[in-house]
Amino acid sequence: MNSKIYKLPINGKELVIEINDLAEKANGSAMLRLGDTQILATCCMAKQDRENAEFFPLSVGFEEKYYAAGKILGSRYMRREGRPSDESILASRLIDRAIRPLFPENLKSREVQLIITCLSWDKENDPDILGLIGASAILSMSDVPWQGPIGAVRIGKIGERFILNPTYPEREESEMDLVLAGIQSGDDILINMIEAEGKELADDTIIKATEFAQPYLREIIELQKKIVSELGKEKLVLPELAQDVELEEKINEFLGGKLEQAIYQGKNETTELKNSLVSLIKEKYPDDKEKILYLNNFWEKEIEKIIRRNILEQEKREDNRKLDEVRNISCKTELLPRTHGSGLFMRGQTKALSILTLGAPGDQRLMEGMEISGKKRFMHHYNFPPYSVGETAMLRGPGRREIGHGMLAEKALAPLLPNHEDFPYTIRIVTEILCSNGSSSMASISASSLALMDAGVPIKRLATGIAMGLITDGNSHKILTDIQGPEDHYGDMDLKVAGTREGIIAMQMDVKIKGISKEILAQALAKAKTCRLKILDTMEAEIAQPRPELSPWAPKIIAFQIKPDKIREIIGPGGKIINEIIEECEVLIDIEDSGQVFITAEKSEAADKAMAWIKNIVREVAAGEVFEGKVKRILDFGAFVEILPGQEGLVHISKLAPYRVNKVEDVVKIGDMVKVKVIAIDEQGRINLALEKNHNNDK
């Protein structure tokens, strides 16, 4: 094996990039290591162009392998990795969002695939960041046309101290989890991707974190440049995009000034104009699919030119709003009669309906993967049906986009939820996007926040989000507030900022240019805060505090503590006792190893009955107490009486009467209800009883 190793000291550890020939048939490959976490990054480019390609076919896969964590997981009948976990999909999207803007436009017809495989995980160093750096390194040194490299870091914050690439325990303690990717432009580092969550962060905390990251991003970029200078392949030379002058003349002759007029009249007018143009071109060039493909590309570029020019020169937006103006906001709660909570949030044409369900602690999602094993008590699921954009499509399971948007809202809302000890319910929110014209992920945060309050979940405060855009020609720029679909599609930035009145709780940024400066980021964050507060005014007018009572349709949960060594007494042999309680009382019972007991029932009376039953089982009786009990068993030396559910004591034959008893059955029989007194509890916890004198068989 031929290999060359490059090392970079970073935060007391070594980032190691090894270039070897293990995956020599790939266009580029590398091994990266930090601590004992190690990944393999590979990229391949198709040998042939795709015909009639309308978009760049880039795919990124982050592969979690159970062996990396020393685990054997999966279905007991399969015992291998199945469909990608949500966590691996999010890592794939993270890498994709950072590298995609740096591919040249004329690579549209060549398929490119990156596969990042985690080979070893040390439970301390995050493989996601290695995957980002690895993707950049292999693209930079390969023959795939790409305009990197980029650097990537994770930033945490504990107290007043920023932490570079924090460990997992440090991330648990941190008030911020910020992933940054950046590219060098002259002496500056431009930010080209952000993924963040935090505990109501101030805007300047984000800016200071980006400043803290700059020197480390520069070092990582310089290391990759060194690798490229020594081992880099010559880039594939792409043909220039051919220009069809004749066709463009015919299109421009037909359009005149119609296209700009149609854009500002609405989507229907633009669609009708394009349909007329397509009919004309098909008539002039029958059976020429390449002409139609060229027309589609030219059409998109013309719309982009008009929208961008008018924003930069006249501050004119498609819907005639001011650059910092938010679309009309309205919201509503209590929409659905039998759900536990619901919230509808409408911003312009974008409408999101969130429905909340409360469940028992046992309804928590079991998580089993390379990095995560445990339970999840809060879930947010985002659905984007085809009717929301007026289209038809096959109905399949959630795609990467749905998973990504759902998780963004989940991250934003999680810090606002009450502790499990105070509110032991499992919480699931489903957001249905009913109509979309941009910023549906931020609308889902707002609608979910309303649904939480409508259900009576005692969250800290309402949350909302806003999507900010950017148009720049390199010399000047305009920041757009509350971008719609076309402004996202034709613009240079999509910055999603979610937060409360107290600060930022989640962020996500993608760009279509190389990157943005920290000054532009600071301006966008400031405008986002102003809008966030305005939106919260409208939401608070609908509901400002959680409802004082949970929905009458929500289950009732009683939580109490028992001694852990009493758990087995509640469960009983083979689960006999706990199953009897569940069936008799019609409840669900969850018991944690700590001795915390949760009883869930539709009616409070059923929960109270089960709680009394369990407390009687675990109750520790004391000498001198008197009970009414049932004779359960009779032996030669005495009778066993059940004084509490699951607790029996022995009435020795000598304690059945104040006289000599020859046979136990002469005094009591199985099934008799008798009054007994606790006379002693021995060292082994056995209860000794005596029959009280008023028993009807006393002589």
Image (spheres, grey):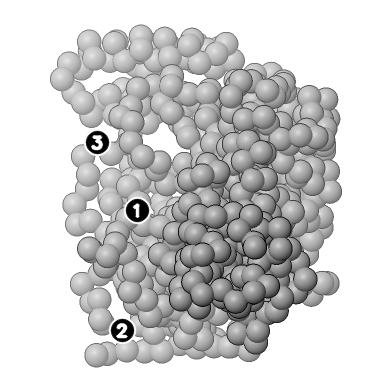
- Which badge, 1 or 3, is on the more N-terminal residue? 3
User: Which of the labelled discs sits on residue 20, or is there none?
Assistant: 2
Give the labeled residue for mark 1: 59
Q: Residue at x 61, y 49 (%)?
A: 610
Q: Can residue 159 be seen from the camera position used here?
A: yes
Q: Nearer the viewer, mark 2 or mark 1?
A: 1
Which of the 4 quarters of the picture holds residue 625? bottom right
Give the labeled residue for mark 3: 52
The answer for how far apart the CA atoms under marks 2 and 3 are is 36 Å
Is mark 1 in CB contact (under 8 Å) with mark 3? Answer: no
Q: Residue at x 49, y 10 (%)?
A: 269
| Residue 329 x/y as whole percent | 72, 23
Q: Nearer the viewer, mark 1 or mark 3?
A: 1
- Count of numbered tags: 3
| Residue 349 x/y as whole percent | 60, 20
| Residue 466 x/y as whole percent | 69, 38
Question: What is the crowding at mark 1: few (fewer than 14 residues within 10 Å), some, or many (at least 20)?
Answer: some
From this view, report whether residue 401 is shown above or below residue 324.
Answer: below
Q: Is residue 363 left or right of residue 608?
A: left
The answer for how far apart the CA atoms under marks 2 and 1 are is 23 Å
